[in-house]
Amino acid sequence: MSLRIAIVGCGKAAENHAVAIKGQRGASIVAACDSEPLMAEQFCARHGVKFAYSDLIPLLEEQRPDVVHVTTPPKSHAPLALASIEAGSHVFVEKPLAESAEDAARIIHATERSRKKLTVGWTYYFDPAVRKMRTRVSQGLIGTPVHVEILQAYDLAGNFGKVVLAQPDHWLHDLRGKLLQNNLDHLLSLAVEFLPEAASLQDLCAWSSADSVCPDLFDELRLTLGDQRTSIRVTFSCRVRPIGYFLTIAGSKRTVRLNLTNQTLMVDSESALPGPLARLAGAFCEAQQSVMNLFQNGADLFRSDSFGLPGLRFLVAAFYQSIEQDDDVPIPYEHILSVSELMDDVIARSEMQPMTAR
């Protein structure tokens, strides 16, 4: 089975998607669309795509794509996704799926009603280290999860941040949750995975730090989720270094630590040896795991699996497979909706926080 793919929105995200799509056997990009015609034309020239459009509706009518990748700013996600579903296409939407849980629910409902498939661009959710962690947790390696720590150390002075700060009319400033809403999907998608059904958002604190280069944006967030069984702490910080994503899951048997930037996974466990010998054994075990991570990353590099966004490539492949085999989508809709609802709660509570430097 071959899949005809269309991309709407021809910015940086579209470039990442194009690379992932080209790596899928039987999939081809047949058209691209951007409200700025030159962007669409240049994208098509770079990627050998035949048809460029400045309006999605004619593209849908004339090209009838099997899948539409929506890689535009978040405010346009809902209308573009709904139009694509109505035209008979499956839809891959960049994160966040929509600006609100209400819009996310509308998209999911339209997808189910039309018997099409939908996924959202949670690339870190499918990174190799995260998939390994998920397998080990499901096998009972850590026992029962007791506490989860998720940290994103963000570089506001990086390539994307520089553009946001230099352009007061950048689309991010129009988002209700601004910087937080554009980044928290990656963290909340992992948090919800370990969140008990009856658990809730217990505490939240957001602020703009004293040395912030953009004091009208919250650049620090701490929130706590969970219940008496499992606690989850999520941190978004523009002050923490080094830059990256870090995940720790402390269980009743063992603790796993992930560095998603380096794609390394470490497992901590108790030693049965006494005193100094236990410390020596622990250091040896950690060194052994470091060597294993080194060889694994080397093998991935040799196979080119570490280039670009491996989580995105995995998600695209899994989504296309679900379409071709009419199987379950890689991210359950209930999970997507739970993250959207939690995001609404986080944004609402952050709006109640004083924009005070600390």
Image (cartoon, grey):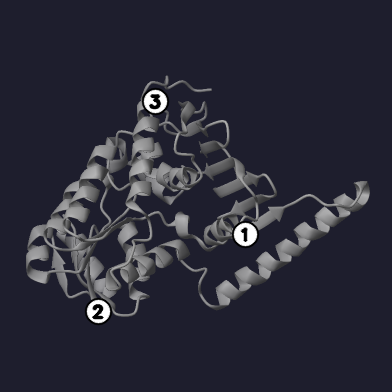
Q: Which residue is mark 3?
A: 349
Mark 2 element type: loop
Q: As shown in the figure, which amino acid type bears the numbered disc 1?
A: Thr
Give the CA separation, mark 1 to mark 3: 34 Å
Mark 1 element type: strand
Residue 49 in the image: state x and y as whole percent.
Answer: 22, 74
Name the mark on residue 2.
2
Residue 46 in the image: state x and y as whole percent.
Answer: 28, 72
**Does residue 319 sit above or below 186 in this rendering?**
below
Q: As shown in the figure, which amino acid type bears the numbered disc 2?
A: Ser
Q: As shown in the figure, which amino acid type bears the numbered disc 3?
A: Arg
Q: Which residue is mark 1?
A: 264
Q: Earlier in the sequence, mark 2 or mark 3?
A: 2
Give the CA separation, mark 1 to mark 2: 35 Å
Estimate how packed mark 2 is, as few (under 14), some (14 to 19) or many (20 or more) residues with alpha carbons within 10 Å. few
The residue located at (39%, 38%) in the rendering is 179
Mark 3 element type: helix
Residue 230 in the image: state x and y as whole percent.
Answer: 57, 37
Residue 30 sits in quarter: bottom left
Give the CA separation, mark 2 to mark 3: 46 Å
**97, 171: nearer the viewer:** 97
